[in-house]
Image: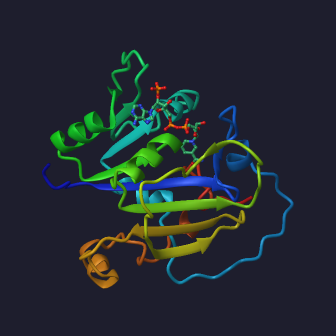
Amino acid sequence: MTARTWHGRVFIGVSLDGYIARRDGSLDWLTDPPGGRDHVAVPSTVPALEWDTFYPDVDHLVMGRGTYEKVLTFDGWPYPDKQVLVLSTTLAGDDERVQVVRTLEEAVAALDGAGAEQVYVDGGQVVQAFLAAGLVDELTVGVAPVLIGEGLPLFGALPADVLLELRANHVSDSGMVHTTYRVSRPGAATVEEEAARWPRSPSSPARCAQTESAPRSRTGSCRRA
Ligand SMILES: NC(=O)c1ccc[n+]([C@@H]2O[C@H](COP(=O)([O-])OP(=O)(O)OC[C@H]3O[C@@H](n4cnc5c(N)ncnc54)[C@H](OP(=O)(O)O)[C@@H]3O)[C@@H](O)[C@H]2O)c1
């Protein structure tokens, strides 16, 4: 097997009790949280990635059928400028905006073959599969201030512990706690080397204030409650 040349990157919202959607797939608790709650403002000098500092760097998305079917209910196709792969054993594959792949191995081969560099990995089962296979390098998780009791889990079983290095963290006005982690690997670049190579890294200043009026992320980054 040749060395992987792309970065697998997760950017996702989750309830404090670990769910990315209710059992029926609904996201109301994340996208339209009830207001009227008084969240303390916690300052941070190293803010986590936000939609505007994460998404533009992505060239490919890989998502599961569950996430794809949810995206189809949104107004318009949100990824016109990206190559999108959908993992599914059941989809017909007749949507020309996406490439359907049947296995994780097929997804990896497609990404390798396409010269992918920055891959946004999305969907609970797909994130779990990529993590278990060692294909995730970075995770940005927005933890919503709510317990929903049951739902579709973000994380699951792993063949071994995945050690993470904290990279950045901030709290949004809606009480979401956003954290960026890098998956720890022997010999990986230091924080300083990473920041020098990649100016958009989480060490860069936050641009949240510029985007609060136009939230674009499902995860509620930079939106006011
Ligand atoms: N909170 C957030 O930020 C966030 C982000 C993304 C998604 N979501 C929500 O999460 C829900 C979907 O999540 P989900 O847990 O159902 O997971 P998902 O990963 O989006 O979709 C699961 C489906 O993907 C296919 N799949 C996954 N791994 C596969 C593999 N290794 N090989 C072949 N096919 C594979 C399977 O489809 P087949 O059954 O067709 O084989 C599986 O049923 C949606 O409601 C979505 O809105 C929330």
Which quarter of the picture shows residue 221? bottom right
Image location (x, y in percent) of residue 95: 38, 20
Quarter of the rendering occupied by the C terminus: bottom right
The image's colour scheme reads rainbow
- On screen, residue 197 above or below 192: above
- Against 225, residue 64 (above or below) is above
Q: In terms of depth relative to the viewer, which is nearer, 123 or 3?
A: 3
In this image, 95 relative to 36: left or right? left
Residue 97 location (% of width, % of height): 35, 27
Q: Residue at x 14, y 48 (%)?
A: 1
Q: Residue at x 77, y 48 (%)?
A: 149
Looking at this view, name the residue that lies furthest to the front: 159
Decide if residue 152 is in sight here: yes
Q: Is residue 65 above or below residue 129?
A: above
Residue 160 falls in which quadrant of the image? bottom left
Q: Residue at x 43, y 70 (%)?
A: 163
Front-most of residues 178 and 156? 156
The answer, for residue 214, to whether it is visible in the render is no
Residue 151 x %, y %: 69, 42
Q: Is residue 118 left or right of residue 177?
A: left
Image mark count: 0
Q: Residue furthest right?
A: 36
Q: Residue at x 35, y 50 (%)?
A: 133
